Every structure is written in C-alpha cells, then in structure tokens.
Amino acid sequence: MRIVVKVGTSTLAHRTGLLNIRRVEKLCRVLSDLKNAGHEMILVSSGAIGMGVGKLSLGARPADMPTKQAAAAVGQCELMYTYDKLFSEYRHNVAQILLTGSDVEQPERRRNFHNTLTRLLELGALPIINENDTVATEEINIGDNDTLSAIVAANIGADLLVLLSDIDGLYDADPHTHPEAKIIPEVHGVTPEILALAGGSGSGLGTGGMVTKLHAAQIAAAAGTDMVIANGEEPEVLYAIVDGVPVGTRFTAEVK
Ligand code: GLU
C-alpha cells in the first residue's frame, strides 16, 4: 500500500515545545517496519514552529509572522536532524520536501512535485513533507498540515491517509461537554451533519483541529483515499490501522 501518515505537533512535542523523544523514536521504528514490510511510506510532519519555540525558549507560539517564520526555520532543522538520525538506524533514507500553497495550486509545480515524489519512492527514500513555513505568508499558505497531507495523498494516489493527533477520532458530540460522547468508527461521506460535529480544538502549539481534519477527509475521499483519524500517543496503532482493524474514525473513499 501507498500510505501517507501525518503527525501533529501535539504528537511530536511536549507542551514545552521540546521533542517527545520516546514518541518520535517509536514513530520512526513503526514507519521503518511498515516500509520494510513493503509499504510505500510518506510522512507529513508538523512541529517546525513548535520545536522552534522550544529551541529558542520563546515560551509560547508567537503571534507575529516574522517570529513564527524564524521559529519554523530553526525548528525544521531540528525536525529533519532527528528524523535523519532515527531513520538511519533502520537504514532508511529520508528526503525533505517543503511546499507552499502555490506549489500545489499551479499545475506545472504540482506536476514537478508529483514527479519528484514518485522518483523518491522509486529510489526507496522516505519523503518527509511540511509546509515551507519560513516563506509561506498568509496569502500563499496552505495553513495546516491536515489539508496539506490530504493534498499530498491525492497528488500521489495514496491508498490510505492516517492523521495521528491528540484526539481519538470524531465523536458524535463534543466530548468536553458531553462525557457520554462516543467515537464514530466509520464515516461514509462528509455530510453537513458530520461537519456540524467539528468543534474547535488545538494544542496551543499546532494549528489543526477537527474542522481541518474533516476538510482533509473531503479531499481524500474525493481522490479515492481512505482516511483515518487516530490518537498518535502510541504510534504502534499504525499496524492495526494498516491491517484495516477499526481504530479511531475511518472516512471511506468515494471511489477507489
Ligand atoms: N507547518 C506547521 C509546523 O510545522 C504546522 C502546521 C500544522 O500544525 O498543521 O509547525
């Protein structure tokens, strides 16, 4: 299978913005193992800004654009250094791809991206993708990696997109106010009723929430890609998801 896994800042970093070493080590081990099993793996990783905040001791996610972009520049290095080091232990080569909105909107650039990604997979590399936060200002940015990961999955014709986050899946009511709320195991079609279930969320360091995840589900479903939202606390959960075991919420593709 061709699988895109997206990890959010809340999965990769502690609340301090510093790396959650145990979590990231487990994630790299599982992704390496799935790759060894023959799957083509693509990682969409957030965490550049969050990790820059930690490294620069900024205390909180900056509100102004230049500081956010500076934090991303520092944090992206830290991210790739960590991934390169950990994946190297399992003999996998990582490749960094940083995109902006215009790279996925303009047909020629989108084609270039597709060709490079395809060749990287042929070469056995593990592409690691993030938004190019250092140059992506508000006018040209994609804005969140849930959407970015769905665009990537659609572009490369992925079989499966997994969003690993700090939530267990899509609930049938807001779990903060309704303790009896239950996870919806499978969604066929992101209807207005489903969209109405998305409340705001967020960890303080990342940008995603249920709204962006449902937007991603729409893009993925239309492109023929199944999408799963699951908790990334234990990255081993990926094994079950790839095997089709019900975990979190699965959004089934409209066409295959
Ligand atoms: N590109 C941002 C980062 O690496 C994350 C965007 C998101 O959390 O969706 O910090």
Image (tube, helix red, strand yellow):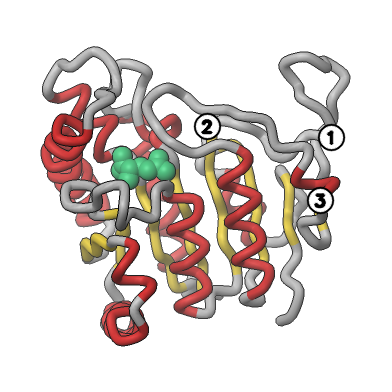
Mark 3 or mark 2, which is nearer the start of the sequence? Answer: 3
Residue that protrudes farthest toward the front in the picture: 139
Does residue 213 appear left or right of residue 177 in this picture? left
* Secondary-structure class at tag 2: loop
Kindly identify the amino acid type of the residue bearing the numbered disc 1. Answer: Asp
Instruction: Give coordinates of residue 100: x percent, y percent.
Output: 29, 61
Q: In the image, what residue occupies the spot 37% across and 71% down? A: 104
- In the rendered image, which residue does mark 1 sit on? 172
Kindly identify the amino acid type of the residue bearing the numbered disc 2. Answer: Glu
Please tell me in which quadrant of the rendered image residue 166 appears: top right
Q: CA distance from mark 3 to mark 1?
A: 13 Å
Q: In the image, what residue occupies the spot 66% across and 76% down? A: 224
The disc at residue 233 is 2
Instruction: Give coordinates of residue 215: x percent, y percent.
Output: 61, 54
Residue 228 sits above or below residue 27 on the image? below
Mark 2 crowd level (few <14, some 14–19, many ≥20, 10 Å Cα):
some
Q: Are marks 3 and 1 in contact (CB under 8 Å)?
A: no
Instruction: Give coordinates of residue 176: x percent, y percent.
Output: 72, 16
Kindly identify the amino acid type of the residue bearing the numbered disc 3. Answer: Pro
Label 1 C-beta lies within 8 Å of the nearest ligand 1 atom: no
